[in-house]
Image (tube, rainbow, N blue to C red):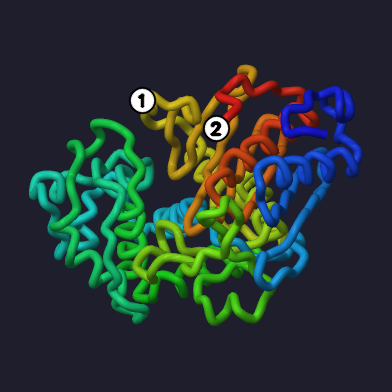
């Protein structure tokens, strides 16, 4: 089977394909794109299914499983946004308020932008900030505060609310808002507000916690065209809100089910009102010149496939790539993680297209090489 096989390889539209068809396609994608390890999870028809192939590392090969941890990159933003929405529902943060209400010490290269930028602008990628700073402010509890003190070096690309542009620094600012309002380090607050209530036991920020579990390392292409281990595993602590969580496809399917649900955890506890989760998936601003999204939501990107709304977020960094896609109309989710560049994104998107077509009969007419 090749990664371009059509829906005839699986079951009929709307029916789950045989497990061997899913596993076969995942193996074909990993082989075709040169990925050492891939993990995939699907939530469809009220059931979970997993398909994993390959190894965590070409140097220390262990089988990739549903519980193998991958660094999530920008997919972490969905956890930061959900924790922030928890504070909104608790009456501690107002989405329409300027960020400087919570961070009066905030300084940007454009003083007007610093005064006008709202919490909602940070959440839906319309703050106008550049992607981020390349600095290391250490691994202490003051890492986010120290990065914020350097934001006068960050270019401001547009006025707030003018257009959508992804910014890791913007989500790091949200992490600092969470710290100031909660009185806890960002990682502790996210664990208490989100990770623990949802039951995500394999979703971790600190490398010393990850080292006790099975985890994937990223790979890059060496001078001979072979996969070589990336010697950097993740970013600095100050980048945790924008991209520093590690998790498994098993935990991420649980996360997807929460966001597809009514705001209750699988234990039946109310974490957020149904309206808040629905609001996070509502369009806010059009995305210009992108085949991957039509509009933004609250941290999510929104795109119609065969006239059906899909909700997704992906992440990448240091040779690891993750993508999570929801189809609320069908109570469906697919998550895929791969551990090699430069084709990890392409492998993930091929697998997502396969899942949409074989489970739901939705044909994604987007760029096949993307």
Are the two marked residues, 1 and 2, in contact with CB atoms closer than 8 angstroms?
Answer: no
Instruction: Locate the N terminus and report the quarter of the image it occupies.
Output: top right
Above/below status of 318 relative to 2 = below
Position of residue 285 in the picture relative to residue 25 (left or right): left
Residue 93 location (% of width, % of height): 33, 56
Quarter of image, res 274: top right
Please state, as top left, top right, bottom left or bottom right, where the C terminus lies in the image. top right
Residue drawn where x is 18% and y is 37% of the image: 159
3D distance between C-alphas at marks 1 and 2? 17 Å
- Closer mark to the observer between disc 1 and disc 2: 2
**Residue denoted by label 2:** 370
- Indicate the position of residue 278 as horizontal and vertical percent values: 54, 39
Q: Position of residue 205 (x, y in %)?
A: 51, 71
Q: Nearer the viewer, residue 269 or 338?
A: 338
Residue 253, given in percent of the width and then of the height, sits at: 69, 52
Using a 10 Å C-alpha cutoff, classify the residue at mark 2 as few (fewer than 14 neighbours), some (14 to 19) or many (20 or more): few
Upstream in sequence: badge 1 or badge 2: 1
Could you tell whether 153 is left or right of 338 in the image? left
């Amino acid at each position: 089977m090749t990664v371009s096989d059509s829906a005839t390889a699986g079951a009929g539209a709307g029916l789950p394909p045989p497990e061997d068809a899913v596993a076969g396609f995942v193996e074909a994608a990993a082989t075709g794109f040169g990925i050492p390890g891939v993990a995939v999870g699907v939530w469809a028809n009220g059931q979970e299914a997993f398909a994993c192939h390959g190894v965590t590392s070409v140097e220390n090969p262990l089988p990739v499983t549903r519980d193998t941890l991958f660094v999530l990159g920008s997919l972490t933003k969905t956890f930061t946004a959900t924790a922030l929405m928890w504070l909104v529902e608790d009456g501690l943060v107002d989405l329409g308020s300027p960020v400087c209400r919570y961070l009066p010490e905030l300084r940007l290269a454009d003083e007007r932008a610093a005064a006008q930028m709202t919490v909602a602008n940070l959440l839906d990628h319309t703050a106008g900030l550049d992607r981020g700073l390349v600095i290391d402010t250490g691994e202490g509890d003051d890492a986010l505060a120290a990065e914020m003190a350097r934001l006068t070096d960050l270019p401001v690309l547009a006025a707030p609310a003018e257009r959508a542009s992804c910014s890791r620094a913007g989500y790091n600012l949200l992490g600092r808002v969470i710290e100031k309002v909660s009185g806890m380090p960002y990682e502790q607050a996210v664990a208490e507000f989100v990770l623990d209530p949802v039951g995500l036991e394999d979703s971790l920020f600190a490398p010393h916690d990850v080292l006790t579990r099975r985890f994937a390392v990223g790979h890059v292409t060496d001078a001979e065209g072979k996969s070589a281990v990336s010697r950097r595993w993740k970013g600095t602590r100050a980048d945790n809100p924008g991209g520093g969580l590690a998790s498994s496809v098993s935990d991420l399917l649980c996360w997807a089910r929460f966001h597809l649900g009514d705001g209750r955890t699988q234990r039946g506890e109310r974490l957020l009102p149904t309206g808040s989760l629905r609001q996070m998936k509502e369009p806010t601003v059009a995305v210009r010149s992108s085949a991957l999204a039509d509009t933004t939501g609250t941290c999510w990107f929104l795109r119609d496939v065969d006239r059906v709304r899909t909700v997704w977020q992906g992440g990448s960094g240091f040779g690891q790539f993750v993508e999570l896609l929801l189809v609320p109309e069908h109570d469906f989710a697919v998550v895929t993680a791969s551990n090699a560049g430069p084709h990890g994104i392409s492998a993930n998107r091929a697998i997502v297209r396969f899942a949409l077509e074989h489970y739901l009969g939705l044909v994604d007419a987007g760029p096949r090489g993307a």
